[in-house]
Image (cartoon, rainbow, N blue to C red):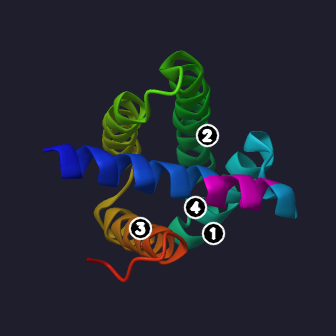
Amino acid sequence: MKTKSILSIVVLFLFAMCMNSFAQMGGGDPQERLKRNLEDLKTRLKLTDVQYKKVDTILTAQMTEMGKIRDAANGDFESMRTKMTELREKTDKKVIAVLTKDQIVEYKKIQEERAARMRQMMGGGGQ
């Protein structure tokens, strides 16, 4: 149990360092990241205007909530990780509810690609 806690702290520390580096490279503005993410989803999922507005609302709410979670964490990375994971799961369900079956298949591919990039950024090969 102690090893898992230490590993979680190390992973979150590395994640924070990667995000800080990303921010310094110009990708740190949450509004800009959200805009790029929405445009990517619009293109790859071929979202209709109605779907785009709904997804925009969902992801904007997620961004706001993530900020609140980070602010409230006070350095408790384990609590923050748990709450962020729960928030992402809820957000994914909301986005999926807006999509067609074909779009859901592509959305899941996008999620897998992002997870693989995150593992690569963290220095892990997937295990």
Q: CA distance from mark 1 to mark 2?
A: 14 Å
Q: CA distance from mark 1 to mark 3?
A: 20 Å
Report if residue 15 lies within the magenta region. no
The magenta stretch is 17-23
Residue 45: x percent and y percent? Answer: 51, 66
Residue on which disc 3 sits: 115
Residue on which disc 1 sits: 43
Dot 3 lies on which element?
helix
Q: Are marks 1 and 4 in contact (CB under 8 Å)?
A: yes
Q: Nearer the viewer, residue 110 or 51?
A: 110
Q: Nearer the viewer, residue 75 or 95?
A: 75
Name the mark on residue 56.
2
Label 3 CA crowd tier, 10 Å (few <14, some 14–19, many 20+): few
Instruction: Kindly identify the residue that appears in the image at 80 percent across and 45 percent down.
Output: 29
Residue 73: x percent and y percent? Answer: 49, 22
* Amino acid on which disc 2 is placed: Asp
Q: Is residue 30 above or below residue 25?
A: above
* Amino acid on which disc 3 is placed: Ala
Q: CA distance from mark 1 to mark 4?
A: 5 Å
Residue 44: x percent and y percent? Answer: 56, 72
Q: Nearer the viewer, residue 112 or 17?
A: 17
> What is the magenta segment's predominant secondary structure?
helix
